[in-house]
Image (cartoon, rainbow, N blue to C red):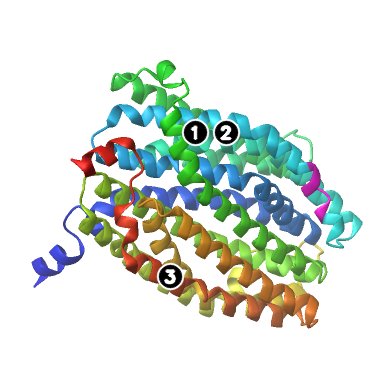
Amino acid sequence: MIRKFLHRHWSGPGGIGALLPIAVPMIVSNIFDTAMMFVDRLYMSYVGKEHIAACMNGGLTAWSCTIFFVGVISYVSAMVARSYGAGHHRECPVIVSQGLRLGLFAYPVILLLAFLAAKTFAWAGHDLRQQQLETTYFWYSIIGGSLLALLRTPLAAFFSGLGRTRIILWASLIAMLVNVVLNYLLIFGKFGFPRLEIAGAAIGTLASSLTVLVILFCSFLAHCRRHGFNFPASWRHNDSICRALLKFGFPNGLDGFLGTISFNAMVTAFHGFGADAAAAVTIVLNWDLLSFFPLLGTQIGITTLVGQRLGAGDPQEAERATFSGLKLNMLYMLFLLFCFVFFARPLVAVFTPDNQGIDYQAVVNLAVPMLRWAAVYLIFDGCYLAFAGALRGGGDTFWAMLIGVTFHWVLAGNTLLAIYGFNCSAMTSWRVWVCSVMLGCPGIYLRFRTGKWKHIKIFAFEQHNSAG
């Protein structure tokens, strides 16, 4: 009985046992990455309500300018997995080099977009003090953070595509330690460091991101030397790989960009309810993101394993890998559902200290029911990400984008209509948000069930093998 259960769910190249070594380090790595943002907000809560809200909105707006290019470049992971699974190992560093080149070309464009994005804080009607804080965090994140993200993404994608995700885990752990210590010193001005408050939070985050980049780049060069790859030669432009990266990565980037823009629009709209509502939403989203980003680790694992299995010509195990990831997500989501419902007040209390002379009572009264409502859509998030990961691993990025964009903008439209069209309260608008999140899962599942993602060819050698 036990042997049969293990064979069905655990064993084989698409089973949970094959997914865990890839997914778990990525899950833990994403927890570390999220913990860095979490610590920023936590430290800011001891400075002021405006600071914690500005940290969230400024960083999210900066990410909105960057996410399209990061999304395109992140498809390096699926391409490396596909090439690795097919036995074309020497092409993997070439794919990475094309991602690095694209990142350098994208950076000036991001800086131009930032000048327009910086004006959104005033357009949203935020008060002058909050605008100043948001702008400070935003420009630090754009000038330094965007470049580091563009260069880090293809390097991390290389190791995730190979399934060697422990390197990413250790890099994220070291970066988190740098972030926690340096942010504490710079935000509060400890041990002779200047008290920089929100600027200190931004600088500490940049230092941790640079740490990840240095570790991944050194590890990448060591891997190339160990396996006889000539990275300088790989740096040259490769037209076919570059075209494939743009073709399949463009929908991936557009999905992330439009989804982030819609999410940012909703967060900005909630901030228009005032400092208490802005702080409450920020607290809830901190816990939400802390729970959500580990799911991205599972999604990366699904994308990698699906890509490797399809590259090896094994679509049955690719589909099985998707359901292995879905099972992991469901177990994790049920645990979070329990925590958010029954421990909402203690979780909110982490960000609302009562000994700093700041009145957080109104924030607590709003954040606690918001967090309990957030538990409702966790299950749907887990399902959506699992099936979307399979579509991306299979190269079906256009439909993943189409469904994702439609879902996110229906979600945004419903929420913004509630806020501005019907003048609903912050709590009612939040309920509309939560209920609208459930709409994305059926569409992505139906596309997955068509099975068309199993037959998409990415590389020229796949076309040749198929013809042969």
Question: Where is mark 3, residue-wise?
Answer: 333
Question: Where is mark 1, residue-wise?
Answer: 99
Q: In which quarter of the image is the N terminus?
A: bottom left
Q: Residue at x 35, y 52 (%)?
A: 394
Residue 41 left/right relative to 75: right
Vertical placement of residue 448 versus 438, above or below: above
Badge 2 amino acid: Gly
Badge 1 amino acid: Gly
Question: Where is mark 2, residue-wise?
Answer: 103
- Secondary structure of the residue carrying tag 1 is helix
CA distance for labels 3 and 1: 33 Å
> Could you say which quadrant of the image residue 427 lies in?
bottom right
Q: Which is more toward the observer, 326 or 345?
A: 326
* Crowd band around label 3 with a 10 angstrom C-alpha radius: few (<14), some (14–19), many (20+): many
Residue 292 left/right relative to 420: left
Q: Position of residue 384 (x, y in %)?
A: 44, 67
Q: Give the range drawn in magenta.
A: 115-120
Q: Which of marks 3 and 1 is in front?
A: 1
Is residue 117 covered in magenta?
Answer: yes
CA distance for labels 1 and 2: 6 Å
| Main SS of residues in magenta | helix
- Secondary structure of the residue carrying tag 3 is helix
Badge 3 amino acid: Met
Q: Which is more toward the observer, 245 or 432?
A: 245
Q: Residue at x 75, y 63 (%)?
A: 268
Q: Where is residue 37 in the image (x, y as percent from the top left)?
A: 61, 51
* Crowd band around label 2 with a 10 angstrom C-alpha radius: few (<14), some (14–19), many (20+): many
Disc number for residue 135 = none
Q: Nearer the viewer, mark 3 or mark 2?
A: 2
Image marks 1 and 2: residues in contact by CB distance under 8 Å: yes
